[in-house]
Image (cartoon, rainbow, N blue to C red):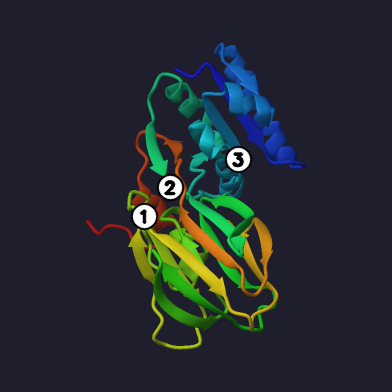
Amino acid sequence: MFNTIGIISKPLDPVSKGTAVELRQFLETQGIGVIDDNALIAEQADLIIVVGGDGSILNTARTFVDNNIPILGINLGRLGFLADVSVGQMFDLLSKVLTGEYTKEERSLLSCQVEQDGQLIYQSVALNDVVVNRQDALKMIEFNVYINDKFVNNQRADGLIMTTPTGSTAYALSSGGPIMHPGVNAIGLVSICPHTMSHRPLLVPGDSEIVVRIKDSSEGVSVHIDGQTSFPVAPGQVVRVRQHSSFIHLLHPQDYDYFEIIRSKLHWGSQLS
């Protein structure tokens, strides 16, 4: 039973704000407490409803991953990979969620650290991916990759994507990476336009630690978190990525079908009778 629900809407978006108001009114008629302040949500909420799209859920996941609060996404546009409840069905679904009729799914995140001479200078978490690339898209960067302290290779490429299973259908997919089911415990490494045909996507166990060491010849490099935030990385600095210690939990309708969403988003063929 959910007693206090946090609602997160998109800033400066009147449609999102209006939908959030409707949700608040509906929930309050059900005797549910509603809050929209992030500090209060972290302390009091036992469910978060995100009114927006997949991008809003990415930001919410990074903010509240360590608070162990399940997340439900209301999609204001087309069907999303993460926000899969339409505005038209949200009241019917919420009525069912409040009585325990839903599917709960665990998703892993990545922890990212940037270090210089062994000192931490930046850290964040990512639900989709951590991307190391050059700010100038017309130039390549050079870097070494290590997994669990073992040298893997030296690369000259536009960059490297380190992705969760959730992020495998985002930037990594458009760069030739494989689709990973969310239940797979793995991290994907996908090179962006590598300067050799021998580089291929690589999947490693979820408990692996990946280190990307930027070569001295590379300048203007950044690490990007879920495509939403970034941090500059100087030559000689290290980007360290591992699976985050906490997970998020997404709530879906009881008839949630991951492969149905994949078929819809990627325009795969329907089953023949």
Pick out the residue farthest to the left.
273
Which image quadrant for residue 34? top right
Q: Kindly state the secondary structure of the residue where label 2 is placed.
A: loop
SS under mark 3: helix
Tell me the quarter of the image containing the C terminus: bottom left
Q: Earlier in the sequence, mark 1 or mark 3?
A: 3
**Where's residue 228, x and y in %?**
65, 55
> Residue most toward the bottom?
196
Residue at image coords 74%, 42%:
13
* Residue 10 figure quarter: top right
Label 3 sits on residue: 63
Residue at image coords 40%, 74%: 151
Q: Residue 242, can we see it?
A: yes
State which tag comes first along the sequence, 3 or 2. Answer: 3
At label 1, counting other C-alpha atoms closer than 10 Å, the crowd grade (few under 14, some 14-19, many 20 or more) is some
What's the CA distance linking mark 3 and mark 2?
A: 14 Å
The quarter in which the N terminus is drawn is top left
Q: Classify residue 139 by image quadrant.
A: bottom right
Going by the numbered disc 1, the residue's amino acid type is Gly
Distance, label 1 to label 2, CA atoms, is 9 Å
Q: Nearer the viewer, residue 233 or 89?
A: 233
Query: What residue is pinned by disc 1?
Result: 206
Q: Which mark is residue 265?
A: none
Q: Residues within 10 Å of mark 2 (few under 14, many from 20)?
A: many
Q: Are marks 1 and 2 in contact (CB under 8 Å)?
A: yes
Residue 138: x and y in percent read: 66, 83
Q: Are marks 1 and 3 in contact (CB under 8 Å)?
A: no
The residue at which mark 2 appears reads as 108
123 relative to 250, above or below: below
